[in-house]
Amino acid sequence: MKCPYCQKEMEKGFIQCRDGVHWTPKKQLVAALSEFGKDSVSLENGVGNNRAVYAYKCGECQKVIIDYAK
């Protein structure tokens, strides 16, 4: 995948978390409870049997892009 910022090739990898990977519009007081936050979106895309998402890292821009499509 090409970086949308610098157009260099990004490295594919994973972001993993024991308690799930979620996006929330506001920071939660307890990270492990983020899945219960208002408007929470699960970023898990079924990678293996653990809580993980594919993510692309740009070493040049130091940005990470997460693909949470199933």
Image (spheres, helix red, strand yellow):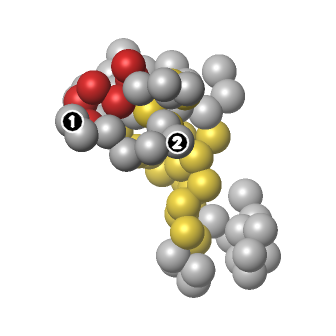
Lateral position of residue 19 relative to residue 39, left or right:
left
Q: Residue drawn at (33%, 22%), measured in percent from left and top?
A: 50
Based on the displayed image, in which of its 4 quarters is residue 2 positioned?
Answer: bottom right
Q: Secondary structure at mark 1?
A: loop
Q: Residue drawn at (40%, 33%), measured in percent from left and top?
A: 21
Q: Residue drawn at (55%, 69%), measured in percent from left and top?
A: 63
Q: Earlier in the sequence, mark 1 or mark 2?
A: 2
Name the residue beneath numbered marker 2.
Answer: 25
Distance of label 1 from label 2 (alpha carbons):
14 Å
- Which three-letter amino acid code belongs to the residue tagged 1? Val
Do the residues under discs 1 and 2 have CB atoms within 8 angstroms? no
Name the residue beneath numbered marker 1.
Answer: 30
Return the residue nearer the eye: 42 or 57.
Answer: 42
Where is residue 53? Give x, y as percent: 49, 36
Q: Is residue 6 above or below residue 3?
A: below
Q: Which mark is residue 49?
A: none
- Which three-letter amino acid code belongs to the residue tagged 2? Pro
**Total of numbered circles in the picture?**
2
Q: Residue drawn at (48%, 50%), measured in percent from left and top?
A: 13
> Does the image show residue 37?
yes
Where is residue 55? Give x, y as percent: 54, 48
Q: Is residue 47 above or below residue 15?
A: above
Quadrant for the N terminus in the image:
bottom right
Quadrant for the C terminus in the image:
top right
Where is residue 61? Give x, y as percent: 58, 80
The crowding category of the residue bearing disc 1, from other C-alpha atoms within 10 Å (few below 14, some 14 to 19, many at least 20), is few
Q: Secondary structure at mark 2?
A: loop
